[in-house]
Image (cartoon, helix red, strand yellow):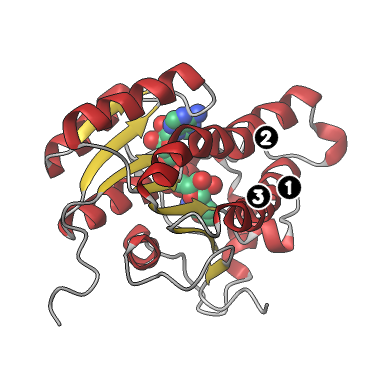
Amino acid sequence: MSDFFRLDGKVALVTGGGQGIGEAICLRLAAAGAKVGVFDLDAGRAQRVALAIGGLGLAGNVTAEADLDSAVGDLKDHFGGVDILVNNAGITGKAGKLWELSRQDWQSVLDVNVLGPVLCCQAVAPLMRERRYGRIVNIASIAGKEGNPTLGPYSASKAALIAFTKSLAKELVGQGDITVNSISPAVIHTPILDGLPQSTVDYMVSRIPMGRTGKPEEVAALVHYLASAEASFTTGQCYDISGGRATY
Ligand SMILES: NC(=O)c1ccc[n+]([C@@H]2O[C@H](COP(=O)([O-])OP(=O)(O)OC[C@H]3O[C@@H](n4cnc5c(N)ncnc54)[C@H](O)[C@@H]3O)[C@@H](O)[C@H]2O)c1
């Protein structure tokens, strides 16, 4: 019984693991026994979290194939492979209405939030297919289901991530025990909120029936389940963690 949800012998790669939700996920997976590669744009943050959990700090950008290949290579050398990928790195981009945002404002968000997870999956899926085992968890957002005003690029990017999850999940069926799922948190208290206008944050909290922001640890608990061997008969799904905001 006590072995349920243990991740001993498993290796996880968590992008954006240096702070916020990603950091909580790293701590949770490590506490369950996984060896964790903490991948982040900010090398200092990645090292700090890795040091705390006996993991491997990996500096890099999710939009750079070379950084991802080198991270996967390091994980293979140190821990023998990658069993779990958590695509958590993401940015909100600039807040603004359609007529206030430029093509570049859109492009930068789509690059990190959509292309980033795609490239991470491309870097890791061959290993999972070879070993016929894998768990991929993509951190989307309630914005991808409902659309938040002034966060058009972000909302569209997270909807794309939910759809990509569904299509990749089906491509990997029949290649062993490999699942791909996404989760859609409502507003969670992390530094990502510092970059947003207070009115945008207030709007998001006002839509949550529980009337509060979520905690990174609450998100990490759901990721832990989806990253476990027990979560073997669910793929292509989007899990809610929104304090009651989502109604579908
Ligand atoms: N906080 C929320 O309210 C909330 C709600 C729903 C979904 N999410 C999603 O959860 C994820 C984590 O959010 P958070 O609030 O912890 O964010 P955060 O800004 O606190 O942390 C994100 C981390 O990702 C890293 N990062 C950013 N761009 C990167 C890149 N290109 N390559 C590698 N690392 C990069 C940053 O350095 C940072 O350490 C994001 O995908 C976000 O969209 C957050």
Q: Position of residue 46 (x, y in %)?
A: 28, 31
Which is in the foreground here, disc 1 or disc 3? 3
CA–CA distance in space, label 1 to label 3: 12 Å
CA–CA distance in space, label 2 to label 1: 8 Å
Which residue has dot 1 on it? Answer: 156
Which is in the foreground here, disc 3 or disc 2? 3
Choose between 93 and 161: the one closer to the eye.
161
| Mark 2 CB near ligand 1 (8 Å cut) | no
Q: Position of residue 65 (x, y in %)?
A: 50, 21
Callout 1: helix, strand or loop?
helix
Callout 3: helix, strand or loop?
helix
Quadrant location, the N terminus: bottom left
**Callout 3 crowding tier (Cα within 10 Å): few <14, some 14–19, many ≥20:** some
Q: Earlier in the sequence, mark 2 or mark 1?
A: 2
Q: Is residue 224 visible?
A: yes
Given contact means CB atoms under 8 Å apart, are the residues at marks 1 and 3 in contact? no
